[in-house]
Amino acid sequence: MKAADIAESAMLAAIKRDIAEGNGFDARTWSLAEREGWPVKVATAKLRKMQQRGLVDGCPCGCRGGWTIEEAAAS
C-alpha cells in the first residue's frame, strides 16, 4: 500500500470522525491509521502530502500528529 491508495476524501472523513469521537480538537495519526486499517507510515505520508497542499494541519514527524482540517478542505 502507498499514500496514493488513500483517497483524500477518506482521510478527511477519518480526521472528522476521530475529532468527533476523541478529544474534540484534533486527530491522532495512530488512531487514524488503526481505525481505517492503514499502515501508520502510509497514513503519515498521506497526511504530509495533504499538509503540503494546505488541506490539513498537524505534525508529520511521527509524533501523535494533532491533525486538523484547514478551511480550504472544510467546504
Image: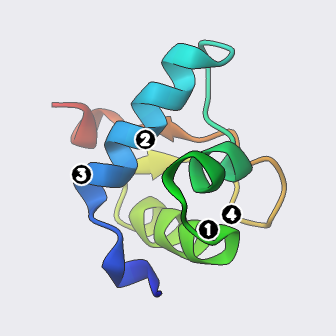
Q: CA distance from mark 1 to mark 2?
A: 13 Å
Q: Select label 2 or label 4 by which is in front.
A: 2
Q: CA distance from mark 3 to mark 2?
A: 9 Å
The single residue placed furthest to the left in the displayed view is: 75
Residue 47: % across, % down? 51, 62
Which type of secondary structure does the marked residue at label 1 adopt? Answer: helix
Q: Is residue 1 visible?
A: yes
Mark number, residue 14: 2
48 lies left or right of 73: right
Asked whether the beta carbons under mark 4 and mark 1 sit within 8 Å of each other, the answer is yes
Query: Relative to the observer, which residue lies in front, 45 or 56?
Result: 45
Labels 4 and 1: the sequence-earlier one: 1
Residue beneath label 3, please?
A: 9
Q: What amino acid is labelled 1 in the image?
A: Thr
Residue beneath label 4, please?
A: 60
55 lies left or right of 27: left
Q: Select label 1 or label 2 by which is in front.
A: 2
Labels 4 and 3: the sequence-earlier one: 3
Which type of secondary structure does the marked residue at label 2 adopt? Answer: helix
Q: What amino acid is labelled 4 in the image?
A: Pro
Residue beneath label 1, please?
A: 44
Instruction: Characterize the local packing of mark 3: few (<14), some (14-19) or many (20 or more) Cα atoms within 10 angstroms.
Output: few
